[in-house]
Image (cartoon, rainbow, N blue to C red):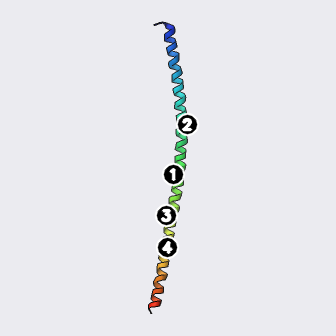
Amino acid sequence: MDNAVILQQFEEIEKKIETLILVCKSHEAANFELKEKIKGLDEELQIKVEAENSYAKERDLVRSKIDGILGKLDEITET
């Protein structure tokens, strides 16, 4: 093989490697952004889960108070 051909092949390989490096950096940046988005969504989900749990506790408390009042009303009407 001619030295010029070998040098040309090395140049092509170097260009391809540079392109691959740029692609990898681009993917790393996109991956970081996606990880940050997932982190934010996880935080939002946790807040919503906590709100839902709080709502369920409040609903149960209201239900038990209503049941208590209905029980007292039943006692009054039975007497």
Cα distance in 3D space between marks 4 and 1: 28 Å
Determine the residue located farthest toward the top in the rendered image: 2
What type is the residue that disc 2 sits on?
Ala
Label 1: state its secondary structure: helix
Cα distance in 3D space between marks 2 and 1: 20 Å
Which of the two labelled residues, at mark 2 and mark 1, occupies the earlier sequence position?
2
Cα distance in 3D space between marks 3 and 4: 12 Å
Cα distance in 3D space between marks 2 and 4: 48 Å
What type is the residue that disc 1 sits on?
Asp
Read off the residue under disc 4: 61
Residue 53: assigned label:
3
Which of the two labelled residues, at mark 1 and mark 3, occupies the earlier sequence position?
1
Residue 29: assigned label:
2
Read off the residue under disc 1: 42
Cα distance in 3D space between marks 3 and 2: 36 Å
* Quarter of the image with the N terminus in it: top left
Which of the two labelled residues, at mark 2 and mark 4, occupies the earlier sequence position?
2
Residue at (54%, 32%) from the top-left corner?
Answer: 25
Residue at (50%, 15%) from the top-left corner?
Answer: 10
Decide: few, some or many residues near mark 4? Use Cα within 10 Å; few <14, some 14-19, many ≥20: few
| Residue 74, position as x, y percentages in the image | 45, 86
* Quarter of the image with the C terminus in it: bottom left
